[in-house]
Amino acid sequence: MRKDIEHSETDKQVRRLTRKEKIETFRKARKRRNRIIRDILMVVPVVVGVGLGIILYQGVREKEKSRESIVFAFQDRVADALPIVAVEKGFFKAEGLDITARVFCSGPECTEALISGGATFGTMGDTTAVILLSRRADAFKIICSHGGGEKRHRIVVSDKSEIRSITGLEAKKIGVKKGTSTHGGLLRFARKHGLDLRDSIVDMSPSLQLTALATGELDAIVASEPTPSQAEEGGFGRPLATLEGLGNSYPVLLAVKACFAQKHPDVVAKVLRALNRAEDFVEGHWDEAAVIQSEINGLGPEVIKRAMGFHSYSVSLDSKIRKSLMASAQFLKTNGTIDQMPDFDVALAPSYLMQASEGARRGE
């Protein structure tokens, strides 16, 4: 019996110890739970803060995207007097735009910047634009012409040349930049006058044409202003003809990426308003506009003013420009330069000019 009692007491102690252990285990578990809850309560504000930070950051990024870097590619030639003046006089900034200017020597170079993603806006002549639109009419929009002129492309021969008429151009070396509006105009000029210049044309940039003409490497050059005026001013070139009378006004065009224009029509309208400001400035300050361009391309103001005289400067996209583009496109297709006609209903976008005009009237 005694042993039974002893065993009973031992069992109670064991049960008591087990209960204590259970209580202690419960306490520890409760402490761990409270610690976890405390940690959670400490972490939640951080997580919420981070989440809000991410949301705010995303909001900032969206705003930054809406103000994408705007790169404007234009030429250092007098045909692009309006973009040059708009940059140098701060007309883009006056419209609230932060424009990065990229200056090139030809329309094809500006077009390449557009295609490669190096530019948002780009200027070019009609032939370059037609070639671009025949391949990518859905990817780019022509939003305006900002200049042009039937006489802005001219044929200049060496001062030592015996060429006295356009028929004398056959079998001679003629420098011209292929793919430009000058090149397109020369092909139409040759067809109109029955000239066979297939073996005469030498693909050469305007900057190299002058040296080649002066050294006798070329017999003639065909270029847009101011290159012809430079040759005459330098005394090694004399005028032979202009590429006028071909039903082409040789508009200088401004293209924009279609996706950008769709997302930011307000920006496109502001760009056009800045060019309108430049148009007014050039009209009223011809001499100063020449000096501004001189600082960009290094030519003398007098040469530039002479070259500007072969141009007209107007921000527009009317039926005359459309007709000129269609005529150029038809010729280039017949000539085999392009495979298909551009869809001008898709590519030409005069609505942005209308929006710019409405905004100007409202004082925006």
Image: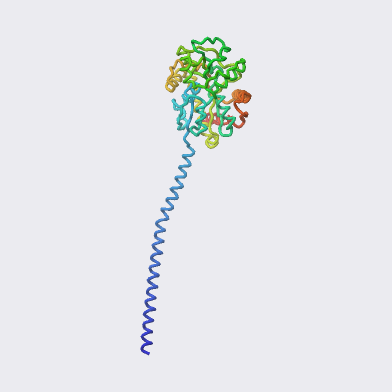
x and y, in percent, of residue 86 in the image? 47, 26
Tell me which residue sits at (60%, 15%) in the image: 195
Is there any visible trace of residue 38 in the rendered image?
A: yes
x and y, in percent, of residue 288 in the image? 44, 19
Numbered marks: total: 0
x and y, in percent, of residue 267 in the image? 51, 33
Quadrant where the N terminus sits is: bottom left
x and y, in percent, of residue 18 in the image? 39, 76
Quarter residue 17 falls in: bottom left
- When the figure is inspected, residue 346 is found, relative to residue 305, above or below; the finding is below
Tell me which residue sits at (37%, 78%) in the image: 16
- When the figure is inspected, residue 6 is found, relative to residue 260, above or below; the finding is below
What colour-coding does the image apply? rainbow
Residue placed most toward the observer, 363 or 142? 142
Residue placed most toward the observer, 105 or 220? 220
Quarter residue 134 falls in: top right
Is there any visible trace of residue 270 in the rendered image?
A: no
